[in-house]
Image: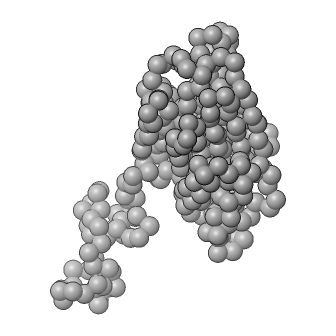
Amino acid sequence: MCETPVVAGDSFCEACGHPLGAPACTACGAPAVDPDGYCERCGVRQPTGRDHSELELEGGAAGVTDRGLRRSRNEDAMALLAVDGAIVTVVCDGVGSSPRADQASAVAVATASAALAEGSSQEKAFELAGQAVNALATSIDDAPACTYVSAVVTAEQITLGWAGDTRAYWLPGPEGSVAERGQGVLLTEDDAVPTGEITAWLGADSGDVELRTRTLAPRQPGLLLVCSDGLWRYLNGYPFPTSDNPLDLARVLLRHALDSGGQDNVTIVLIPFGGSHG
């Protein structure tokens, strides 16, 4: 940073203390990217693998997560796993007012999805995820936090668990009613006050939060949609397009969110249920 000559093998500049061998900034080229991913010279945050990622499982289940257009980083996280004939997904949205919200969502997703894949109940997976997020806090005033929704989809039924305002929808296939096909059916109920502030989340400052659960067995084929508010805030009056490919549909929904403003991180998971879903 200060351009003082250094000795080969040194880890830090003796003049300014800057670590040597730091990654180069993608914006200005300076070897000055700090451990948090920001350039110390121009201030630009460096892109990460979480800025945009896609998952697709054999059988069609797919997920997309994206930083959106207004946020400096993606604080959403998702998991999508195929386990013994079931599909497991967990989506968490970092609470933007909390510190290190991206870490909260990542550790919650990793912990809960692993527990569900091993056969744990929705409640147990949520408890373990909560413990993992709580462990990130250094104090009650430094408590990373995230919302939570999980789903386990088998050939017979769908089980859901949630806390916060991350949502799940049912998108009926061709046999569903015209109204349902156009708008989808909301399966979860937000933990939030009318002004939009959430009343339940994972975090050391959350108090006693009880996971809400639901089990359903749709009689007709369709798609389970699990998403963060970066998508659902733009769904009012939006006619869901039909698609034979969940990944293609997830990309269409992402494009809709971005074209509508992209004010938040966007995560979309689509899981087919009951055969045909086009």
Q: At x 42% / y 44%, what residue is drawn? A: 53
| Residue 91 occupies quadrant | top right
| Residue 264 occupies quadrant | top right
Residue 260, x across and y down, in percent = 52, 30
| Residue 103 occupies quadrant | bottom right
Residue 238 in view, yes or no = no
Residue 259, x across and y down, in percent = 47, 30
Q: Name above or below for residue 234 compared with residue 54.
A: above
Q: Name above or below for residue 102 compared with residue 246.
A: below
Residue 228, x across and y down, in percent = 60, 40
Q: How many marks?
A: 0
Closer-to-camera residue (258/91): 91
Closer-to-camera residue (70/158): 158
Residue 39 in view, yes or no = yes
Closer-to-camera residue (215/136): 215
Q: Which quadrant would the N terminus be assigned to in this image?
A: bottom left
Q: At x 72% / y 71%, what residue is drawn? A: 140
> Is 176 positioned to the left or the right of 74 in the image?
right
Q: Name above or below for residue 231 compared with residue 197.
A: above
Q: At x 44% / y 67%, what residue is drawn? A: 36
Q: At x 43% / y 26%, what residue is drawn? A: 248
Taking the view exactly as shown, the residue that stands out farthest to the front is 84
Q: How is the image coloured?
A: one colour
Residue 115, x across and y down, in percent = 62, 54
Closer-to-camera residue (73/161): 161
> Is 249 positioned to the left or the right of 147 in the image?
left
